[in-house]
Image: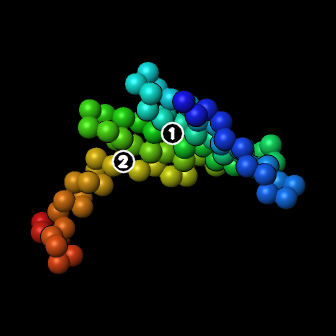
Amino acid sequence: MLTQLTAQDNETETTFIFSYDDMNRISQYIKSVGGIQQESWNFYYGPTGIDKVTRTQGGIQNLSIELSKEFLIWGKINRKGRKTC
């Protein structure tokens, strides 16, 4: 299982660290550039897969997507792009 990936671009090193839950699904990844953490992503699972994704940058959570809610909203849009309810 991949736990760390590092790339070198000229003098800058970018590192990704991966964590997994008990079912071997990715639960978090952290991106660092030049040894400084840039962002972290957390993945939360429900019975049908990923339920929620969050991103933290600079110690502030600035993105949260609840996929089950997004799916419900998307399901209310018909093929012509019009809301059905």
Extreme-left residue of the structure: 84
Q: Quadrant of residue 1?
A: top right
Would residue 9 be visible to someone looking at this image?
Answer: yes
Q: Going 49% across and 45% down the picture, which residue do you hit?
A: 54
Give me the C-alpha separation between circle 1 and circle 2. 12 Å
- Above or below residue 75? Residue 5 is above
Mark 1 or mark 2: which comes first in sequence? 1
* Number of other residues with Cα within 10 Å of mark 2, as a class: few under 14, some 14 to 19, many 20 or more: few
* Number of other residues with Cα within 10 Å of mark 1, as a class: few under 14, some 14 to 19, many 20 or more: some
- Out of 44 and 23, give the one closest to the viewer: 23
The C terminus is located in which quarter? bottom left
Total marks placed: 2
Q: Amino acid at mark 1?
A: Asn
Q: Going 28% across and 47% down the picture, which residue do you hit?
A: 68
- Above or below residue 21? Residue 33 is below
Q: Going 54% across and 47% down the picture, which residue do you hit?
A: 55
Which numbered disc covers residue 77?
Answer: none
Q: Which residue is mark 2?
A: 66
Left/right placement of residue 12 relative to residue 48 reads right
- Above or below residue 7? Residue 25 is above
Q: Position of residue 73 (x, y in %)?
A: 24, 59
Would residue 82 be visible to someone looking at this image?
Answer: no
Q: Position of residue 74 (x, y in %)?
A: 24, 61
Q: Nearer the viewer, mark 1 or mark 2?
A: 1
Q: Position of residue 4 (x, y in %)?
A: 65, 36
Q: Position of residue 67 (x, y in %)?
A: 33, 49
Left/right placement of residue 78 relative to residue 49 reads left
Q: Which residue is mark 1?
A: 42
Q: Amino acid at mark 2?
A: Glu
Extreme-right residue of the structure: 11
